[in-house]
Amino acid sequence: MRKFIPAGLAFLVLIAISVATFSLLRQPVALVEGDAWDFRLRPEEMPTGWTLDGQSVQLPHNLGAAQLGTDGAAVFSNVRQIYSARYTPPPDSAYAEFTLEVLIYNAVADAQAALEVESPGENWERIEGPTVGEQTVIWHYRDPAPVVDQNLYRVDFRYLNAIGSVTMFGQTAAVPNADEALAYARRISAKMQTAPVPAPLQRLHSRQLPDPRPLLLLSELPQLDPTLGDRWEVNPQALGAWTENEDFNAEGRAVLEQLGRITGYQLYLIKPLSAEELAQNPEAAYAVFQQVSVYGLAENAPRGLAAMIGLPGAPESPQPPAVGERARLWSTLLRRRDTNATIAITEINFVVDRYVATLQVQTAALPADADQNAALNANQQRAIAWAQVLAEKLRTVKP
């Protein structure tokens, strides 16, 4: 028997479906899942004449227990990333500097606890003011022996598991109160609330696929690299980023879309070493590039691997290493055009299930009297060993 729904009831059913769908789309976000630097203020967002004087990213292994002390250990407990930036005003400005910091924690409770125990130190006083995000603390520095008429304000705020901190320093005429610092804090908080989860990650979530960022080699590097391995940090000149198909040229994009590549993520790490440390460890790894591309179907990933270019100008190895299900390798001594120095560099691309990954490892400039072929061989073996660890991480999380 055919059943008919009365028009009025059908209309109510449609409303109920629409409301349910809207509710699903507007589910509250549980965590801020973007990278800390996603919420930074770009130079073009600062007033005319201000410049980005420097930026950095710290990972958990960069935060040595000895340098933190008890208070620092409490503030940075379970922190995932710390992004810092410093901006300087134009010459002869009444401002001195502006700084910001964004910290991403593993959980909301971790961020709450950190903000509650954080204190800038002696001579800082808490003052009343409006709330930014979900929780705010405003600080004012009271100079016990002021030499010039100036002010320093700091605004710490939290949204879910993310904490932002901004400081504004300058002459009292330019910085009479915390209002300007609060305005910048609101900008950063708005970024967190507008896009707490990157669009590529949302697509992966919708397919119940994992975030590729934790699959990269980060916390493992200090153990894998016996030569000052705890120094590895995110390259401040090439911050980690999602790689969408539209980021490639027209030909590459067509191939990737045909193969059903969903998205990818890349991260460039460097190990800053002094001249003395480089002299003592001439063949040490100096830079690591990693990327993971996620394909909709595992059967298309090998074709994605076949489309990889590798190191331009370097010969591809006819005997690739046993990494993942299939791998390709390029390794060469490369003379840098800018310094005329020679480095050893190795790149391995490989497939694990629906993932195509890249691991590229390079040395710093090799000494003139170094056995360059030996350095290249050592770098290649290191890259293979690290790529095998990366492949194992990908293998353990495949859906």
Image (tube, grey):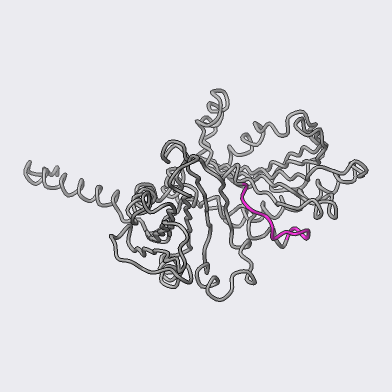
The residue located at (11%, 43%) in the rendering is 11
**Depth order, front residue of 374/128:** 128
Image: 21 above or below 137:
above
Image: 131 above or below 4:
below
Image: 260 above or below 235:
above
Camera sees residue 153? yes
Left or right: 190 in relation to 198? left
Which residue occupies the extreme front position in the image? 147
Q: Quadrant of the N terminus?
A: top left
**Depth order, front residue of 398/290:** 290
Find residue 287 and report its horizontal and vertical position in percent.
Answer: 71, 46
Left or right: 161 in relation to 364? left
Left or right: 372 in relation to 238? right
The residue located at (9%, 46%) in the rendering is 9
Tally the marks.
0
Find residue 394 and report its horizontal and vertical position in percent.
Answer: 61, 52
Find residue 335 and report its horizontal and vertical position in percent.
Answer: 81, 33
Q: Check if residue 166 falls in the magenta segment.
A: no
Q: Which region is colored magenta? A: 224-235
Which residue occupies the extreme top position in the image? 251
**Depth order, front residue of 341/110:** 341
Image: 3 above or below 150:
above
Camera sees residue 318? no
Find residue 7 and report its horizontal and vertical position in percent.
Answer: 7, 41
Left or right: 117 in relation to 213? left
Q: Report which quarter residue 293 is drawn in.
A: top right
The residue located at (77%, 41%) in the rendering is 346
